[in-house]
Amino acid sequence: MTFYPDERIGLFIDGANVFSTTKSLDFDIDFKRLLDEFRKRGRLLRANYYTALLEQDDYNPLKPLVDWLDYNGFSVVSKRAKEFTDDQGRRRIKGDMDIELAIDMVEAADYLDHIILFSGDGDFCRAVKAVQNRGTRVSVVSSLRTSPPMIADELRRVADNFIELRDLEHMIGRGGE
């Protein structure tokens, strides 16, 4: 991973995608360590975390994380998830944040030198290209080591750099050294 000391960096984290990836890799991210790690690599100007939240009367397991992120250096971008019943009568939840993340990334390209996208979703290919066309480098953090791989092949190919999430575990994992 190549970073430059005066480089203006932004983190864009697809919360649902990262959660699924770390669950498959069997580790949890320590978000304080993640911020500290990227602050060492350049001038961290932006750290966005994207998630959809179910509005429930009872306990929402994401709420403590979202609150902590919001008070500790992250800009949390969220919207209400929609709950519905599919054709087979199963309860489903839809809360896609791709458009919000993609638009924010493209807009941020005007003031960032390097965007680090934490997602393996191939839907971001066009946004990555748009950012690159504005002169901003894009590194994608995801995993080839899950089964199946969490990184879409086309996203890995379009990115300037691919960073294997498992390789960051010792730097950003909870309980790591």
Image (cartoon, helix red, strand yellow):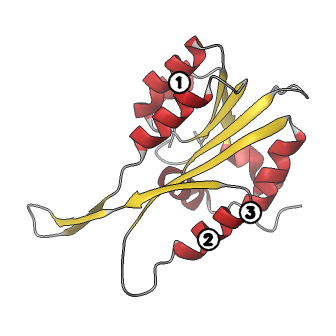
Q: CA distance from mark 2 to mark 1?
A: 29 Å
Question: Quadrant where the N terminus lies?
Answer: top right
Say what secondary structure mark 3 lies in. Answer: loop
Q: Which residue is painted at 51% across and 39% down in the image?
A: 120
| Picture quarter with the C terminus | bottom right
Q: Nearer the viewer, residue 43 or 174?
A: 43
130 or 170: nearer the viewer: 130
**In front here: 23 or 18?**
18
The answer to whether the residue labelled 1 contacts the one labelled 3, judged by CB atoms less than 8 Å apart, is no
Amino acid carrying label 2: it is Asp
**36 relative position to 10: left or right:** right
Task: From the image, tell me which residue sits under label 1.
Answer: 128
Image location of residue 127, percent across then percent down:
47, 25
Q: Residue at x 10, y 65 (%)?
A: 88
Q: Are marks 3 and 2 in contact (CB under 8 Å)?
A: no
Asked if one can make out residue 152 in the rendered structure from this viewpoint, the answer is no
Q: Name the residue tied to disc 3.
A: 72
Crowding at dot 2, Cα within 10 Å, few <14 / some 14-19 / many 20+, comes out as few
- What's the residue type where badge 3 is placed? Asn
Counting every numbered tag in the picture gives 3
Residue under the image location 83 percent in, 62 percent down: 176
Q: Quadrant of residue 175?
A: bottom right
Q: Is residue 85 visible?
A: yes
- The residue located at (64%, 63%) in the rendering is 70
Three-letter code, disc 1 = Val
Mark 1 or 3 closer to N-term?
A: 3
Residue on which the image places disc 2: 67
Disc 1 vs disc 3: which is toward the camera?
A: 3
> Residue 30 at what x, y percent from top left?
74, 62
Callouts 2 and 1 close, C-beta under 8 Å = no
Residue 3 found in image quarter:
top right
Extreme residue in the left direction: 87
